[in-house]
Amino acid sequence: MILDKKTKISLIATLFIGLLLGALLFGGSANEKEKIATETVTKEQIWTCSMHPQIRRNEPGACPICGMDLIPLETSGSGDIDPNAISMSESAMIIAGVSTIKVGSSDGIKEIALNGKVEVNEKGVYSQSSHIPGRIEKILVTFTGEYVRKGQVVAYVYSPELASAQQELLEAYSVKDIQPQLFEAVKQKLKNWKVSETSIKTILKSGKAQDRFAITADVSGYVVKKNVELGDYVQRGQTLYEVADLSTVWVLFEIYETELNWIKKGDKINYTIASFPGESFSGTISFIDPFINPNSRIAKARIEVSNSNFRLKPEMFVSGTAKSKVATGKSSLSVPKSAVMWTGKRSIVYIKNEAESGISFKLREVTLGPLLGDNYLIEEGLEAGEEIAVNGTFNIDAAAQLAGKPSMMNIEGGKVNTGHDHGGMKGTMSNEKQATLQTIKTTISTDAKTSLQPLYKDYFELKDALTKDDFNLAKNTISKFENSLNKINMNLFKGDAHKIWMNYQTELKNNILHAVHIKDIKEMRKSFERISNVMIAMTKSFKPLKESSYIQFCPMANSDKGANWLSKENKVVNPYFGASMSKCGEVKQAIK
C-alpha cells in the first residue's frame, strides 16, 4: 500500500506525540518512586538519648554512655533552629523532667521568716530595796512569781540604828520648845528612812521606840528575782527583790546579719504564738539592736505589746513574717530558684524557643537581684513573656555540653573530647570549671559510695607512687584506675547525682586516655594534677569517703601556678616533686 505525503506526515506526528506522552507518564512515575523512596529513608526512625543527644541509633536500646533507655527522635527540619541552641523533642523533655514557665512580674516584696520569744519589758522592771539597815525579822514575799501591790508590806526589819534614831526623836521632842530645829532635823532623818508621819506620831504618843519597821512595795508587779531570806542583814539601799510589771511585754525577734538590710524600724510584723494556735497578732518594730551578737551573728527587733490580761508570758515562742519592698521603680521580673544555674561568676537560664522545626533551648546569662522567698528578681537578661526552663535545667545543660553547644561549663561551646588526642594535653579543666564542679553538692546512695571506693584506692596508690618517684608503679596504677572507673555502675547515681557523675566520669576518662600513653614521670604528674582536680571536686560533691581526707597544695607545681592533690593523711608528702621536695606544700582544707 502506497501512502501519500499527507498521510505520512500525520502518522509521524501521531507517533511523536505518543512517545512524548509515554515519556511523561513513565518518567514521572519513576521520579515519583524515587521521591517516595527518599522520603522513606528520610522518615526512618532514629533513636537517641535524652541526656546525650549526640548518640544516634536506628533501633531502640540503651545509651552506651549512661545506660539510659534510648528514645525516638522526632525528625523535623532544623533550618530555623539557632545553631547555639539544643533541640529537644517533647518526649525527650518528659523523660528529662523539663518543665517551663513564662517570665512574669513581681511586686518586689521580700518575705522574711522570723523567730522570737516574749520577754519582760525591761522598762517595767524595778528593784525593791530596803530603806532601813538592819536584820530581816519577817519576810512576806516568799517565792518568785508572786504578785505584789504597791503599798503592800513585803518585810519587817529590826534596825539598831533606827532604834537609836527613835530615842533621839523622843529626846528632841522633850525639848522641842527650846530647840525646835533639832526636833525637825530628827524627824526628817526618820522620814529619809521612809518612816511615815503616822509612825512618828505613834512613837511620840506611846513614848516608846518600835522594835520592827515595815518595808512596803514601791510598785506593783510580779517578783522575778528574790535576793534575801529571813534573818539576812541588809544595808540601806540593798535590793530585796526585783519586780516586773507585765502589763506590757516585749516580743523580741531574731534577725540574722544577712537580713538586717531588709528590716527597718517601723516595719510591721505579723506573728503567731505557739501557745495560742489559730490566733494571729501583729505589731510594729519600735527598736532594733544597734549591735550584732558576735557569737550568734544576730540582732533583735522589738515590738511592744499591751498585756493587760496577762495572757502573754515571758519565754513564749513566737513565729513571725516581715515584708520588705526591695524592688525599685516599677515591678521587676522574677524567676524560680530552680530555673537559675550559677557558677559563682555567672548566672544562666535556658530560654525555650518553638518553631516549625521543633523545640529548642538556648543558654542566656542573667543578672540576679535579691532572693524573694523561692524566686530571684532579675535585673538584666530577661523580658516579660519569655519562656524559660524551671525544672530539668541540669539535664538541658548536660545535653548542651555534650553536644558542643554553649553551656554552664563551657560558655563558648565546643565538642566534648571523647577520643585520643595526643597533640597536646587538652583535658585540663579551666579554673572556672573546677570552681563549678566544686560547688555542685548532692547526696548519693550507700551503694553508689561503695562503688567509688576502688577508684579512690587506686588514686591514693597513684599519689603514693609519684611521691616515691616510681614511674612504672604509677603507670600500672593508672591502668588499674581506668579499670575501676569503667566498672562503676552509672545506674547507682540517681537524679541530679547522675548528671554530676557523668561530668566527672567524662573528665576522668579524657585524662586517662592521655595518661596511658605517657612516657615519663614529668608528664604523668601533669596528668595527675588534672585527675586530682576532678577527684577533689567529686569528693566535695558526694562525700563518699568514710574517713576524713585533706586537700593539699604545692605553690611551685604546675610551672609555679600551683597544684592541688587529695590525701588521706594530714601530713604533706608532695607527689609533684617526690623525694627532691617531699615536704613542699600545705594542707588547705579538710573534708570530713
Image (cartoon, helix red, strand yellow):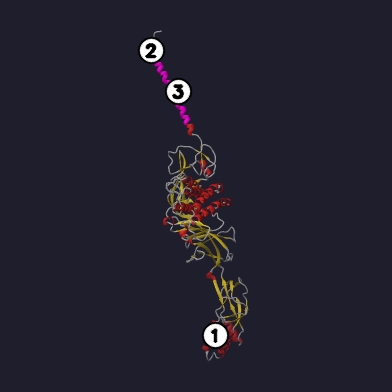
Q: Residues within 10 Å of mark 3 (few under 14, many from 20)?
A: few
Is residue 59 in view from this perspective?
Answer: yes
Residue 107 in view here: no
Crowd tier of the residue under label 1, counting other residues whose Cα lies within 10 Å: few below 14, some 14–19, many 20 or above: many
Q: Image quarter for residue 141?
A: bottom right
Q: Nearer the viewer, residue 489 or 192?
A: 489
Residue at 61% of width from left, 77% of height from top?
A: 229
Cα distance between the residues tagged 1 and 3: 142 Å
The amino acid marked with disc number 1 is: Lys
Region in magenta: 12-38
Residue that numbered label 3 is attached to: 26
Amino acid type, label 2: Lys
Q: Residues within 10 Å of mark 2 (few under 14, many from 20)?
A: few
Mark found first going from the N terminus, 1 or 3? 3
Work out whether residue 117 or residue 54 is closer to the camera in this orientation and state it.
54
Residue 132 drawn at (x, y percent): 57, 81
- Residue 8 circle label: 2
Residue 375 vertical placement versus 146 (above, below): above
Q: Quadrant of the N terminus?
A: top left
Q: Are marks 3 and 2 in contact (CB under 8 Å)?
A: no
Image quadrant holding the C terminus, namely bottom right
Instruction: Name the secondary structure under disc 3.
Output: helix
Q: Cα distance, mark 2 to mark 1?
A: 165 Å
Residue at image mark 1: 187
Q: Residue at x 46, y 29 (%)?
A: 35
Q: Earlier in the sequence, mark 2 or mark 1?
A: 2
Please tell me which residue lies in front, 227 or 179. 227
Per the picture, the main secondary structure of the magenta-coloured stretch is helix
